[in-house]
Image: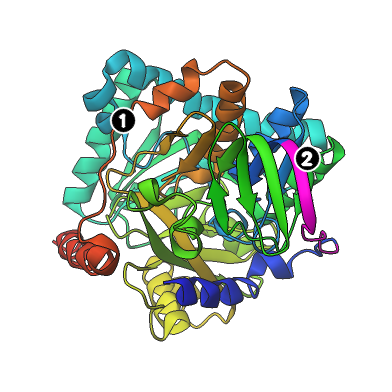
C-alpha cells in the first residue's frame, strides 16, 4: 500500500490544481530538536485548521508534513463543500439520539460558515461558489433521493428545489438523470488554493511548518515525542491529522486506530477549457453535483470553464487500468455533449473512509488527539475538526467529545485481507447500483 500511495502522490503532482497556480518555495524540513506546545502531523485542511485555532489561543505550534502542504487529499479532492456527513444523519441518530444528531448537523453548517469566515479574514481567493445538485439516475434512486430530501427538510430544515423527468434538464442538461434536488448551502472551491491560503494564515500567526518531514515514531508520556529522519519534537500535545497516510506510512504512530479507516483511491479528470456558453447551458446555476449511487460520480465546472469529473474509485491496491479513457467514457454518459472533448489532466489518490462513513475523532491516552474518517466529506468538516480539537486542548472539550462518542469498528480481515474484503463488498454494491 505504501508504494501505491507514493505512486499516487506522483500522479497528484500533475493535477489541474497544481498546474493552475504557483506554489511558494518549499519550507525547510526539521533538523535538530524542537520543543513546542503542540505538534501536528499533517499539513492538510485539518492540521492547518487546528494550527490556526491553537495559535490564536496562544499555543506554540509545529506542523510536520511528510511531503508538501496539502499534497494529500486536501489538495487534490473534488472541491465539493457539502453539508452533513457521508454516513447520513440516520447513523448519528441511531448512535447518539436525535438531539445530539441535530447538534452535529448544526455543526456541519457551522463548518461551511467557518470556511467562509477564514476566506474573508485571511483574504483567501479560492473560487468559492454556492450551490449543489443531488442527482439520481434511476426510478429507484429517485425514490431514495426524494425520501432523503423529505426527511432532511422535515427534521433538519434543509430546503431543496426538486425536478423530475424532462424538467431535470433545466437544472442539469444531462439525459442520464431522472430526478434532482438543488440546495444552496453546499457548494465548491478550488481546494489547493484554499489549503495554501490556510498555510499562509498559519505562518502569519507564528506556526512553524516543516515540509518533507515525515513523522516516523511517536512516544507517549507526560511529554509527547515525535521522531523524524533528522529531528525530534517534544510537545505537551500531539494531533495526528494525516488521515489515510498514517496507516500506510506510519503504523507505528497509531496502531490502535489504523484498522478503523481504509484508504480508498478516487480519481478526477479535467477537460480542456470549454465554451463558457456551453458550461452555462450544462449547469446553469454553476453548482457542484453528485449522484446517490454507492459508487458515485461527482463533478463541477472550474472557474476557467473546465469540467472536473471524478468518481472512478479503487478499493484495491491498484490504480485502475486505462484510467483516463474510462473516466472520459463515464463523463460522456453524463454529458454526451462533451464526448470526444480532450482531457488535459488526470490525477487522484487516496481518501480515508470509516466503516460507517462517520467521522472518527478521538484521543489516544491523555494528550494525543487524532482526526480521521472524513469519508469524502472533508472539505468543510476538516476545518471544524481542527477547531474542535484546539478547543479540547484548551479545556473546552464538550463539542469534540460529542464526535468521540461515535462508535467505530475495524475493517475486517486484518492488514492483509482488509482491502480484498472491501473490494468484494463494493462489487456487491456496484451491482445493486445498476439494478
Q: Assign a secondary structure to mark 2.
A: helix
Is 32 in the magenta? yes
Residue on which disc 1 sits: 89
The one nearer the camera, 264 or 295, is 264
In the image, 63: left or right of 383? right
Boundaries of the magenta span: 25-36
Q: Assign a secondary structure to mark 1.
A: helix
The one nearer the camera, 302 or 70, is 70
Q: Earlier in the sequence, mark 2 or mark 1?
A: 1
The one nearer the camera, 87 or 276, is 87
The one nearer the camera, 227 or 259, is 227
Residue 104 percent location from the top left of the image: 42, 23
Q: How is the image coloured?
A: rainbow
Residue on which disc 2 sits: 202
Residue at the spot x=82%, y=59% of the render?
A: 27
* Numbered badge on residue 401: none
**Is 188 drawn above or below residue 319 in the view shown?**
above
In the image, 30: left or right of 376? right
In the image, 49: left or right of 108? right
Q: Do tag 2 and tag 1 residues touch (Cβ < 8 Å)?
A: no
Visible in this render: residue 275? no
Q: Would you call the spot at circle 1 few (<14 residues within 10 Å), some (14-19), or many (20 or more)?
A: many
**Is 313 drawn above or below residue 92 in the view shown?**
below
Amino acid at each position: 500500500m505504501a508504494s501505491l500511495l507514493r505512486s499516487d502522490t506522483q500522479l497528484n503532482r500533475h493535477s489541474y490544481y497544481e498546474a493552475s497556480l504557483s506554489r511558494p518555495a518549499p519550507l525547510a524540513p526539521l533538523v535538530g530538536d524542537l520543543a513546542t506546545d503542540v505538534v501536528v502531523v499533517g499539513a492538510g485542511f485539518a492540521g492547518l485548521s487546528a494550527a490556526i485555532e491553537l495559535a490564536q489561543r496562544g499555543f506554540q505550534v509545529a506542523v510536520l508534513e511528510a511531503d508538501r502542504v496539502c499534497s494529500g487529499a486536501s489538495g487534490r479532492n473534488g472541491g465539493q463543500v457539502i453539508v452533513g456527513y457521508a454516513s447520513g444523519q440516520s447513523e448519528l441518530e441511531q448512535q447518539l439520539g436525535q438531539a445530539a444528531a441535530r447538534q452535529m448537523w448544526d455543526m456541519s453548517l457551522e463548518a461551511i460558515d467557518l470556511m467562509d469566515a477564514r476566506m474573508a479574514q485571511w483574504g483567501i481567493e479560492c473560487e468559492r461558489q454556492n450551490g449543489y445538485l443531488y442527482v439520481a439516475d434511476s426510478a429507484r434512486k429517485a425514490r431514495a433521493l426524494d425520501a432523503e430530501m423529505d426527511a432532511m427538510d422535515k427534521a433538519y430544515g434543509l430546503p431543496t428545489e426538486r425536478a423530475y423527468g424532462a424538467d431535470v434538464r433545466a437544472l442539469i442538461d444531462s439525459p442520464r438523470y431522472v430526478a434532482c434536488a438543488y440546495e444552496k448551502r453546499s457548494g465548491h472551491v478550488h481546494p489547493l488554493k484554499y489549503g495554501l491560503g490556510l498555510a499562509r494564515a498559519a505562518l502569519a500567526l507564528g506556526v512553524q511548518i516543516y515540509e518533507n518531514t515525515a513523522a516516523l515514531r511517536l512516544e507517549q508520556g507526560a511529554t509527547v515525542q515525535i521522531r523524524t529522519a533528522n529531528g525530534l519534537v517534544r510537545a505537551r500535545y500531539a494531533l495526528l491529522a494525516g488521515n489515510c497516510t498514517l496507516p500506510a506510512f506510519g503504523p507505528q504512530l497509531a496502531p490502535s486506530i489504523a484498522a478503523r479507516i481504509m484508504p480508498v483511491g478516487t480519481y478526477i479528470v479535467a477537460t480542456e477549457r470549454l465554451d463558457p456558453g456551453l458550461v452555462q447551458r450544462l449547469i446553469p446555476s454553476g453548482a457542484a453535483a453528485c449522484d446517490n449511487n454507492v459508487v458515485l460520480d461527482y463533478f463541477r465546472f472550474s472557474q476557467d470553464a473546465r469540467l472536473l469529473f471524478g468518481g472512478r474509485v479503487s478499493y484495491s491496491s491498484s490504480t485502475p487500468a486505462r484510467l483516463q479513457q474510462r473516466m472520459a467514457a463515464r463523463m460522456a454518459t453524463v454529458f454526451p455533449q462533451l464526448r470526444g472533448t480532450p482531457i488535459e489532466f488526470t490525477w487522484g489518490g487516496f481518501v480515508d473512509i470509516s466503516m460507517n462513513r462517520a467521522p472518527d475523532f478521538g484521543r489516544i491516552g491523555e494528550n494525543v488527539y487524532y482526526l480521521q474518517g472524513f469519508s469524502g466529506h472533508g472539505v468543510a468538516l476538516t476545518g471544524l475538526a481542527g477547531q474542535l480539537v484546539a478547543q479540547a486542548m484548551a479545556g473546552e472539550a464538550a463539542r469534540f467529545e460529542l464526535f468521540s462518542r461515535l462508535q467505530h469498528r475495524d475493517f475486517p480481515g486484518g492488514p492483509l485481507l482488509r482491502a480484498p474484503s472491501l473490494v468484494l463488498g463494493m462489487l456487491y454494491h456496484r451491482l445493486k447500483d445498476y439494478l
